[in-house]
Image (tube, grey):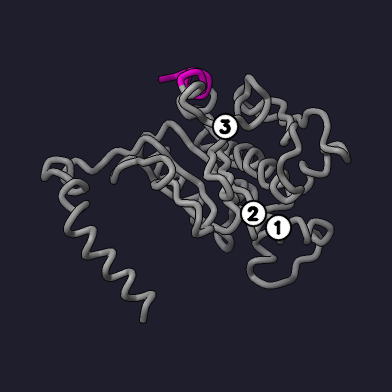
Amino acid sequence: MKGLEKILRGIIKYQLTDKVRMKLSPQNIIEYPTPNFLFISCIDNRVLPSHFTKIDCGDAYIVRNAGNLFPPRDAITFNSVTAEAGAIEVACVLNNVRHIFVCGHSDCKAMSLLFSLKNQCHTHSGTPLQMWLKKYGVASVRKFDQLDSKFVGPLTFQGRFSQLNFQVNIDPENKFPVEDKLSQVNCLQQLQNIATFPILHEKLSKNQIRLHAIWIDVRTGNVFIFSRDEKQFVEITERNYLQLVRECFPVD
């Protein structure tokens, strides 16, 4: 009862405070909003892209799943098509989204489970969550296993397009547990997975679509973005955000 009451009271609060601000004009309803961003986020209840980015209604498409995974194109068949594949077509083909963000986070239960299963990804059995993680998280596990045993030195990603060729130092100051390191690797691997879709290739080749990785430390609320220049996830601050805009949004 208390849970339902919270939802309904929230709706009343929305009607009193946010409804007018979020209401689209008649012309915009006719023309349909044109979002600029697509977020691929974990379903964790502590990670809400619309909250930590302060985007408005109509600004973005948001897809959420366990582990912020994006199944690659070769995994998509009539019998195994995923919502993520459909979403990217809606966002980037039927509409003109230019920026795709993969959003991971610390203390991710999905990544912790994937880490515990990392030597079992070859077994095609388990609970629905286990099978989801093993099937679509195996590439992240393989990339993670390329890290030095002490997590020292860069990890190399190579892709078809220039923005997907980079090196990264995962948690160089060793602030986070090993599962969080896997979570950061996983975010970057999903950028590679997204780029496997031929429907995006022309735009990716012309830098008309940019791929970004964001990572949130749920313990502190700090938000990080992967910097190709710095070769690591860097905290977004008042001091550096303009520099990050110039680096991450060069086509704007």
Residue at coordinates 50% horizontally, 39% vertically from top-left?
A: 101
Which badge, 1 or 3, is on the more N-terminal residue? 1
Which badge, 2 or 1, is on the more N-terminal residue? 2
Report x, y in % for residue 167: 72, 26
Q: Amino acid at mark 3?
A: Glu
Q: Nearer the viewer, mark 2 or mark 1?
A: 2
Q: Quadrant of residue 186?
A: top right
Q: Quadrant of residue 214?
A: top right
Residue at coordinates 68% horizontally, 72% vertically from top-left?
A: 127
Judge whether residue 234 is colored magenta: no
Q: In this rendering, does residue 207 appear at all?
A: no
Which residue lies under the disc numbered 1? 112
The relative height of residue 6 versus residue 245 in the rendered view (above or below) is: below
Residue 235 - label? 3
In-front residue for pair 106/121: 106
Cα separation, mark 2 vs mark 1, equals 8 Å
Q: In this rendering, does residue 116 appear at all?
A: yes
Cα separation, mark 1 vs mark 3, equals 23 Å
Quick check: 1 left or right of 157?
A: left
Q: Which residues are magenta?
A: 242-252
Q: Quadrant of residue 129?
A: bottom right
Quick check: 105 left or right of 243?
A: right
In-front residue for pair 49/171: 171
